[in-house]
């Protein structure tokens, strides 16, 4: 049986990168791979375990079919390496850091994907972005405005969107993520 594609998404600053880092070892322990994204962001400002490339290099890789999924957001290009298809075929779960804006297209290629929306209380979000200090004030405002584009849908078509709150301790969010993955992996016994 193919593995599951777990599509983690959420507003900028909600804690996707932090969660992925903190959950890396426990995810590995349950046979869930975390893929490194390819991003047109300089190495110094990557801020996550991603591969930074130039726009030209990104376009070349895209042209050569290196990406299973790719999108453009916040002035950057993001690519998910096609190796995930191999992992899924081998029955391994794969977690990716996805985009809310790209969810519908991602579902077209992976109809069985599991969307997880990381949420955080409004007031905490701005504070976290400012504290992270990776973007300028202008870029932070643009990211906050981008949130208005996304409504809090409970599902996309037939696919439910699982919500995971990260307003509290990161360790609690890690535990809840693992619980969610275990619960949804268990066949319905009823
Ligand atoms: N549960 C948490 N409690 C406190 N700070 C957090 C928590 N999760 C993330 N952060 C902090 O919030 C900021 C944004 O987190 P980050 O993982 O970069 O978010 P994203 O990848 O979603 O943009 C970082 O400075 C990070 O250290
Ligand atoms: O459609 P959206 O849900 O708004 O997502 C747009 C992009 O922003 C995030 O990336 P990135 O890690 O570069 O941004 P962040 O760290 O500021 O969240 C996310 O992973 C997407 O690649």
Image (spheres, rainbow, N blue to C red):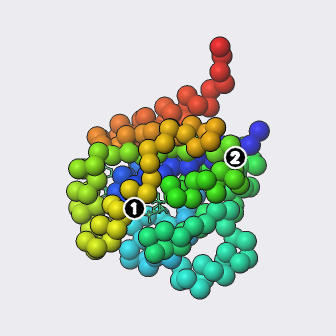
Residue tagged by mark 2?
111
In which quadrant is the N terminus drawn? top right
In which quadrant is the C terminus drawn? top right
Q: Secondary structure at mark 2?
A: loop
Task: Quadrant for residue 69, please give it.
Answer: bottom right
Ligand 2 within 8 Å of disc 2? The answer is: no
- Count of numbered badges drawn on the protein: 2
Q: Quadrant of ligand 1?
A: bottom left
56 over 109 or under it: above or below: below
**Counting other residues with Cα less than 10 Å from the Cα at mark 1, is it few (<14), some (14-19), or many (20 or more)?**
some
Disc ID at residue 84: none
Q: Earlier in the sequence, mark 1 or mark 2?
A: 2
Residue tagged by mark 1?
146
Ligand 2 within 8 Å of disc 1? The answer is: yes
Q: Position of residue 86 (x, y in %)?
A: 74, 55
**Counting other residues with Cα less than 10 Å from the Cα at mark 2, is it few (<14), some (14-19), or many (20 or more)?**
few
Are circles 1 and 2 on residues that touch, CB within 8 Å?
no
Q: Residue furthest bottom?
A: 56
Q: Nearer the viewer, residue 176 or 33?
A: 176
On the question of residue 78 being in view, the answer is yes
Q: Nearer the viewer, residue 82 or 9?
A: 9
Q: Position of residue 46 (x, y in %)?
A: 42, 71
Q: Position of residue 45 (x, y in %)?
A: 38, 74
Instruction: Work out how far the residue at label 1 is from the one at label 2, CA to CA, in angstroms.
Output: 25 Å
Q: Nearer the viewer, residue 173 or 71?
A: 71
Q: Is residue 170 left or right of residue 94?
A: left
68 over 63 or under it: above or below: above
Q: Residue at x 39, y 67 (%)?
A: 47
Q: Residue at x 55, y 82 (%)?
A: 55
48 over 185 or under it: above or below: below
Say which of marks 1 and 2 sits in front.
1
Q: Residue at x 28, y 73 (%)?
A: 138
């Amino acid at each position: 049986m193919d593995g599951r594609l777990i599509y983690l998404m959420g507003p900028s600053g909600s804690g996707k990168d932090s969660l992925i880092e903190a959950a890396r070892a426990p995810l590995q322990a349950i046979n869930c791979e975390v893929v490194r994204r390819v991003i047109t962001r300089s190495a110094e400002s990557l801020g996550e375990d991603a591969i930074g490339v130039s726009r030209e290099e990104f376009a070349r890789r895209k042209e050569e079919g290196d990406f299973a999924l790719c999108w453009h957001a916040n002035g950057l290009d993001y690519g998910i390496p096609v190796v995930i298809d191999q992992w899924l075929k081998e029955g391994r779960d794969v977690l990716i850091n996805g985009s809310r804006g790209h969810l519908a297209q991602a579902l077209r290629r992976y109809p069985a994907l599991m969307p997880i929306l990381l949420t955080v209380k409004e007031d905490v979000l701005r504070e976290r972005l400012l504290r992270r200090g990776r973007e300028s004030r202008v870029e932070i405002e643009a990211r906050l405005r981008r949130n208005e584009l996304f409504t809090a849908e409970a599902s996309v078509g037939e696919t439910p969107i699982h919500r995971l709150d990260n307003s509290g301790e990161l360790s609690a969010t890690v535990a809840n993520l693992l619980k969610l993955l275990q619960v949804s992996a268990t066949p319905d016994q009823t």
